């Protein structure tokens, strides 16, 4: 797969084949990719809690918000839910700034998942204290985000948008998920 194809296939999937189990070995391989990414001052403050056990994944699911632009949609139905999660933590004893690290690592994990035929969704809308209690996460760790993982079971289309078009993603009458993206001419600026 060419890198451009990998990037365009790496979308925020929210529906998965619930019969396909993502194993701890696969999750470990994805975290290993995150071990090699750049980190400011090479502090490497990120830690991960894998959630592959079906009962624990079921308990984590209702503590996540799935699609801010689709308020009428409660998230994936039974049989369409992720079968694994990675809970990303920031170790406060190493750093208090995780912005660059978390973005680089999360995207690398999703690219690795895509290259392996999987998909995922980075979720930042979390019930953090309930997740902390569920997974028994010590206070020294800041809960940053959750990456849902599984075998994608939906079609996502990237739509080119013109300046001024809405950025809201949506689902059409055929349940195809559309994601509008700005084009390069709108992103490249020159002030000279």
Image: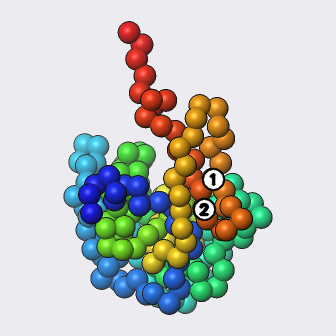
- Residue 69 coordinates in the image, percent (x, y): 69, 54
User: Disc 2 on helix, strand or loop?
Assistant: strand
**What is the total number of numbered labels drawn onto the structure image?**
2
User: Disc 1 on helix, strand or loop?
Assistant: loop
Residue projecting furthest to the front: 174
Q: Quadrant of the C terminus?
A: top left
Q: Quadrant of the N terminus?
A: bottom left
- Residue 189 coordinates in the image, percent (x, y): 43, 22
Q: Which mark is residue 110?
A: none
Quick one: 158 or 27, which is closer to the camera?
158
* Depicted 48 relative to depicted 24: above or below: above
Name the residue beneath numbered marker 1: 169
Name the residue beneath numbered marker 2: 177
For disc 2, the neighbor class at 10 Å (few under 14, some 14 to 19, many from 20) is some
| 58 relative to 48 in the view: left or right | right
Q: Is residue 63 visible?
A: yes
- Residue 178 coordinates in the image, percent (x, y): 59, 56
For disc 1, the neighbor class at 10 Å (few under 14, some 14 to 19, many from 20) is some
Q: Is residue 127 visible?
A: no
Q: Are marks 2 and 1 in contact (CB under 8 Å)?
A: yes
Give the image's coloring scheme: rainbow
Q: Residue at x 27, y 74 (%)?
A: 29
Quick one: 77 or 131, which is closer to the camera?
77
Q: Residue at x 31, y 68 (%)?
A: 115
Where on the picture, by quarter, is residue 27?
bottom left
In whole angstroms, how far apart are the C-alphas of marks 2 and 1? Answer: 7 Å
- Residue 177 coordinates in the image, percent (x, y): 60, 62
Q: Residue at x 66, y 41 (%)?
A: 166
> Which numbered disc, 2 or 1, marks the residue that appears first in the sequence?
1
Q: Residue at x 57, y 53 (%)?
A: 179
Residue projecting furthest to the top: 192
């Amino acid at each position: 797969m060419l890198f451009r194809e990998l990037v365009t296939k790496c979308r925020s999937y929210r529906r998965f084949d619930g019969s396909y189990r993502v194993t701890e070995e696969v999750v470990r391989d994805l975290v290993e990719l995150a071990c090699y990414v750049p980190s400011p001052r090479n502090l490497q403050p990120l830690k991960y809690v894998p959630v592959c056990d079906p009962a624990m994944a079921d308990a984590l699911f209702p503590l996540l918000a799935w699609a801010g632009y689709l308020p009428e949609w409660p998230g994936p139905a039974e049989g369409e839910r992720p079968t694994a999660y990675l809970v990303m933590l920031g170790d406060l004893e190493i750093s208090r700034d995780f912005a660059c690290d978390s973005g680089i690592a999360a995207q690398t994990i999703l690219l690795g998942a895509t290259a392996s035929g999987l998909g995922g969704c980075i979720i930042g809308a979390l019930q953090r204290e309930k997740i902390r209690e569920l997974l028994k996460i010590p206070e020294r760790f800041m809960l940053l985000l959750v990456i849902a993982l599984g075998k994608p079971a939906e079609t996502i289309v990237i739509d080119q948008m013109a300046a001024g078009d809405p950025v809201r993603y949506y689902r059409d009458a055929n349940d195809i998920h559309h994601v509008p993206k700005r084009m390069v001419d709108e992103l490249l600026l020159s002030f000279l």
